Image (cartoon, helix red, strand yellow):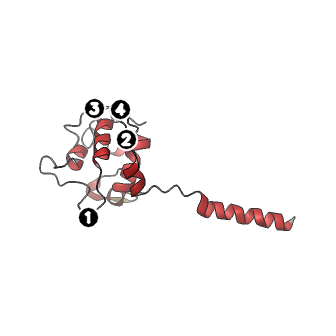
Amino acid sequence: MKKFSEIILVAIITISLFGCDDTITNQDVDNMIIPSSNVSFSQHVYPVFQVKCFSCHGNGIYEAGLDLTLRSRFVDGRIVVPGDTLTSILVWRIDRPPRAGFNPMPPEFMPQLTSNQIRGIKIWIAEGALDN
């Protein structure tokens, strides 16, 4: 019986260390197709922010005071104006070329947003920047 319990213990440790890796990568988000309607914050937008933006705007680092880890911290009528892509500063920053003299984000030396990701974020904002 001791041998069986040792095998189970080794299996549990192995699974916990190697079998449950839910880390999302740049390639994962770049391969994700964001739909042209019903864009989900949790399924489509947040993973992009996690991979492309959190190194400067998440995980305890908040460049320019911007925290993208919680929707409530940036859907504020200024950074993201629900339903309005024209006045949302986030769109000004991610759009190419940038508007109103804002530097483009992410910076050139960081992994860039794809056109699909930019379009998806704009659709999410236009649809009301829902917490879905």
How much space separates mark 2 and mark 1, taking CA atoms? 24 Å
Q: Three-letter amino acid code at disc 3?
A: Gly
What residue sits right under mark 4 in the picture? 37
Vertical side of 6 occupied by 66: above or below: above
Q: Position of residue 64 (x, y in %)?
A: 25, 56
Q: Position of residue 44 (x, y in %)?
A: 40, 43
Q: Position of residue 75 (x, y in %)?
A: 32, 40
How much space separates mark 3 and mark 2, taking CA atoms? 18 Å
Look at 35% across and 60% down and name the residue there: 55
What residue sits right under mark 1 in the picture? 109
Q: Three-letter amino acid code at disc 2?
A: Ile
What residue sits right under mark 2 in the picture? 34
Check disc 3: other Cα within 10 Å, few if <14, some if 14-19, many if 20+. some
How much space separates mark 1 and mark 4, taking CA atoms? 31 Å
Asked whether, in this view, residue 37 is left or right of residue 1, the answer is: left
- Which residue occupies the foreground of this view, 74 or 1? 1
Look at 31% across and 44% down and name the residue there: 116
Of mark 3 and mark 4, the one earlier in the sequence is 4
Q: Position of residue 76 (x, y in %)?
A: 29, 40
Instruction: Classify the position of the C terminus by image quarter.
Output: top left
